[in-house]
Amino acid sequence: MIHHTGRVEVICGSMFSGKTEELIRRARRAVIAKQKVQVFKPDVDTRYAIQRVTSHNGMAFEAIPVPNARAILERLEPDTTVVAIDEAQFFDTEIEPVTEQLARQGIRVIVAGLDMDFRVSRSAPCPH
């Protein structure tokens, strides 16, 4: 199935709430549906593996580490229909315009990240 209209799906919550696990689940379902999936992660996230996103329960999916949000656009392959981005809170402020641009291009974008940071109790509300 090819997407004719893009969209942004946000998976947010606290640490250990299953965000990466859900991102991996959605990416795997897209692969099963024969969609071209690319998963990106910030290159500072080296906790489990450099070229994989890994959930706390051991689920994993191949990923491309990038230094900033704009690098996602540079590494995007032409036939990609689904882009998944893990640990969005570690990206620079360009993450929002990049995800919007991808959606305007007709790509389904799945973004996972924390809904809080160390400075405030809640930096941005989760969309409902």
Image (spheres, rainbow, N blue to C red):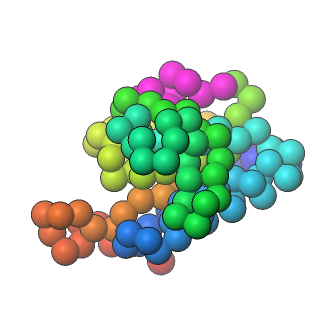
Residue 14 vertical placement versus 43 (above, below) = below
Is residue 103 found left or right of 78 in the rendered image?
A: left
Residue 34 point in image, percent of width and height: 86, 45
Which of the pair 86/10 is nearer the observer?
Answer: 86
Which of the pair 44/2 is nearer the observer?
Answer: 44
Which quadrant of the figure has residue 121? bottom left
Q: Main secondary structure of the magenta part?
A: helix
Q: Residue at x 56, y 35 (%)?
A: 51
Is-magenta flag for residue 74? yes
Residue 11 point in image, percent of width and height: 50, 65
Residue 72 point in image, percent of width and height: 49, 31
**Residue 99, visible in the rendered structure:** no
Residue 3 vertical placement versus 116 (above, below) = above
Q: Residue at x 36, y 63 (%)?
A: 114
Residue 47 point in image, percent of width and height: 42, 47
Is-magenta flag for residue 86? no
Is residue 68 found left or right of 63 in the rendered image?
A: left
**Residue 36, visible in the rendered structure:** yes
Which of the pair 7/30 is nearer the observer?
Answer: 30
Q: Residue at x 64, y 59 (%)?
A: 59
Which of the pair 8/16 is nearer the observer?
Answer: 16
Q: Residue at x 40, y 35 (%)?
A: 43
Is residue 29 found left or right of 77 in the rendered image?
A: right
Per the rendered image, the range of residues in magenta is 70-77
Q: Residue furthest bottom?
A: 128
Residue 5 vertical placement versus 56 (above, below) = above
Q: Number of callouts in the render? A: 0
